[in-house]
Image (cartoon, rainbow, N blue to C red):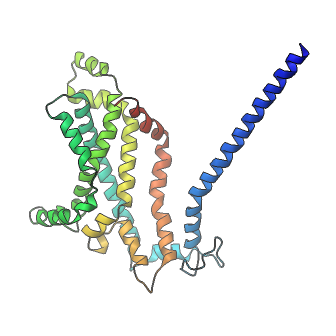
Amino acid sequence: MSRTMSVTGRKVGSIKQQQRMALLLRIFLALIVLFYAIFPVVWIFSASINPSNSLVNQQLIPENATFANYRALAASTLFPFRTWMWNSIKLATVVTLLGTLFTALAAYAFSRFRFRGRRSLLQTILLIQVFPNFLNMVALFLILQQLGRYIPWLSLNSHGGLILIYLGGILGVNTWLMKGFFDSIPRDLDEAATIDGAGPWQTFWMVIMPLVRPILVVVGLLIFVGTYSEFVLARVMLTTQENYTLAVGLSLFIRDQYANRWGTFAAGALVGALPVVIIFLALQRYLVGGLTAGSVKG
């Protein structure tokens, strides 16, 4: 009896030791990932408080650290940083609201309705998304140039034209993502709403939309981040500084070969990242559910 208890005790001790080792390994890997994620931000902050305004011989803790770059960023009259940031927030917000609404309508139609050409249309949408928007830059430029002759607020160097381009580029893949989530919602709810006298529009707004809130948040967040940080199309379509987005405006600080302002650029990058960080923190509870629930059925 005592021998059996001794063997059992050794097995329990061995299992506990393995569990402790596994826990230590997970903690070690988590610290590595955390360091890998945080170190670039720390390095950029170090550059933003470096008075030399250069990345040559950059140190993690610079000598004579100062916040002069942040003050110069706020007080600059040559580069309207606050205007650029407002333009980016405005564009990203409008594209997010319209893109999420249009994506939800398209996903609901593909998920709930059966019509001729449905599968072919879905495959076509997915195929078109293989080619990113910046490959069509010349065509998009000419389209806005011609469109601006008839609708001035959708012309080149206008935020309306840029919004139109962004909306065309985000609907495809997000429609597929949201459709998978719609497919996971039982159709019995639609049938029950129909029995109660609700039409397709009422079913969509009053029954389905409250249930798909997690995927709406995920899609909206992806659209906001992608639009807020987009550079290539905005650089081509916008031509005046007062219409620049934040990404395009910040490039002016490092465009001049002999007068680069790396410290001011780093300060602007950190300040410009604040809206995205705030949105992530506010909506993080929806992210996991929104990204995984639609993968069960699709």
Task: Residue at the far bottom: name it.
Answer: 258
**In the picture shown, does residue 110 fall above or below 255?**
above
Task: Please identify the quarter of the rendering in which residue 60 is found.
Answer: bottom right
Residue lying at 71% horizontally and 43% vertically, measured from the top left: 24
- In depth, the one of 15 and 158 nearer the eye is 15
Q: Can residue 293 be spotted in the picture? A: yes
Task: Residue at the far right: name it.
Answer: 2
**In the picture shown, does residue 224 fall above or below 84?**
above
Q: Can residue 152 be spotted in the picture? A: no
Q: In the picture provided, is 90 more to the left or to the right than 286?
A: left
Task: Residue at the far top: name it.
Answer: 1
Q: In the picture provided, is 99 more to the left or to the right than 271?
A: left
- Quadrant location of the C terminus in the rendered image: top left
- Residue 16 at x, y percent in the picture: 76, 31
**In the picture shown, does residue 1 fall above or below 172?**
above
- Quadrant location of the N terminus in the rendered image: top right
- In depth, the one of 297 and 252 nearer the eye is 297
